[in-house]
Image: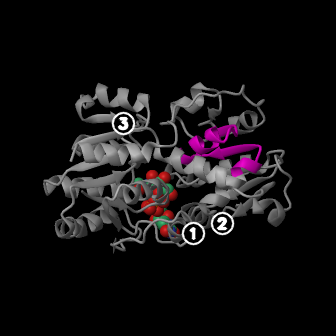
Amino acid sequence: MRILSVVGARPQFVKLAPIDRAARAAGVDHVIVHTGQHYDPLLSDVFFDELGISAPDVHLGVGSGSHGVQTGSMLGQLDAVISEHAPDWVLVYGDTNSTIAAALSAVKMHVRVAHLEAGLRSFNRRMPEEHNRVLTDHAADLLLAPTQVAMDHLAAEGLAERAVLVGDVMTDVLLATRDELVGTSPLLDELDLAPGGFQVATIHRADNTDDPERLREIVTALGSLEYPTVLLAHPRLVARAAEAGIDLAAGTVIPHAPLAYRDLIAAVLASRHVVTDSGGLQKEAFLLRVPTTTVRTETEWVETVDLGWNVLTPDVADIAGAVSRPRPDDTDAAPYGDGRAAERVVETLRSHA
Ligand code: UD1
């Protein structure tokens, strides 16, 4: 069996790592196509190096652009790549422009498509990721869902027959990385921080970065928190802040370059709280049992909210109160699976081949 994985953005490299490992362990031929959506070494190369992912077989080098230009550039190149490698499955990940491009290319070429992380919904049609995941689910032949809630969404859209609950592959890599950590976060020494004495923050979504007034409010709110906040700044945040003349080093904020995966996990574990608009980080913080405040109107990972570990604060004025709330009750709930989802993915692809 040959699987052709298409990835392009940072969270997809994290999801690719356990799939690549499981594919190799199962003796499956695994072709990796990197679209080049993310090209900064800190958003791309470090993940391949650190997580031991096989080097991409094909690199499309599309770079940044408007949604249409970026997606179109991928589509224009993917037909030939899929045709050349003739896989049994094209595997697409998550909800980025790389996901929808690969799903569309494969389905048009009558090559079967499997969607990893199928069925997640924010029900917010302003999000580019929501268009990408809904359209990808309806195009794909096999829907690999991370949670029961995702399975329920697929059923509600008439897609139950194509859906399989496999668990969350990000949990696989998170638990393995946590267990291999040696010592504490290098950030403590580097920034002179006390364990449990700082927040980790990431803000990169268009809804938070692209309106200068909202971005300024968010940065000001972070800067007025009692404990320092290490703001791991995605290039998009840096670019939008510079354009709007916003100094990210406001008040108690300590801006910092994005971290490699292991360093991120160590930083979150050492922190008292996470403030984010990332999907993956909300869930990672929950798995590490670090309370989280999410600066969005909704989340796809509703279990983190239901279990009390994540609070949504679309209103910037609510961030400070949410960050200082008491730690929630401990839980041994495991809504994201047992850390062996990737093996199940490869097995499911094989049994459906
Ligand atoms: C993309 C995904 C988002 C995911 C995020 C993870 C889509 C629609 N969005 O958002 O779901 O959560 O990745 O980070 O696919 N840039 C650089 N260097 C890079 C990449 C981007 O400087 O290596 C800058 C460029 O100014 C670019 C901007 O970031 O225009 C946005 O990048 P893009 O890939 O379009 O979307 P993300 O915001 O990264």
Front position in the image: 302 or 241:
302
- Disc 1 packing (10 Å; few <14; some 14–19; many ≥20): some
Q: Quadrant of residue 119?
A: top left
What x and y, as percent, mark residue 331? 66, 27
- According to the picture, the residue beneath numbered tag 1 turns out to be 42
Taking depth in this image into account, of 131 and 113 the one nearest to the observer is 113
Q: Earlier in the sequence, mark 1 or mark 2?
A: 1
Mark 3 → mark 1, Cα distance in angstroms: 29 Å
| Chosen colour scheme | one colour
Cβ atoms at labels 3 and 1 below 8 Å apart: no
Q: Quadrant of residue 308?
A: top right
Q: Is residue 27 left or right of residue 311?
A: left
Q: Amino acid at mark 2?
A: Ala
**How busy is the neighbourhood of tag 3: few (under 14 within 10 Å), some, or many (20 plus)?**
many
Q: Is residue 284 magenta?
A: yes
Please say whether residue 202 is visible from this viewpoint.
no
| Distance from Cα at disc 2 to Cα at disc 3 | 32 Å
Q: Are marks 1 and 2 in contact (CB under 8 Å)?
A: yes
Q: Which residues are magenta?
A: 268-293
Q: Residue at x 84, y 56 (%)?
A: 193
As displayed, is residue 88 above or below residue 115?
below
Q: Which residue is mark 2?
A: 257
The residue positioned 31% from the left and 53% from the top of the image is: 91
Looking at the rendered structure, the secondary structure element under dot 1 is loop
Mark number, residue 119: 3
Frontmost of labels 1 and 2 is: 1
On screen, residue 282 above or below 23: above
Q: Residue at x 38, y 43 (%)?
A: 344
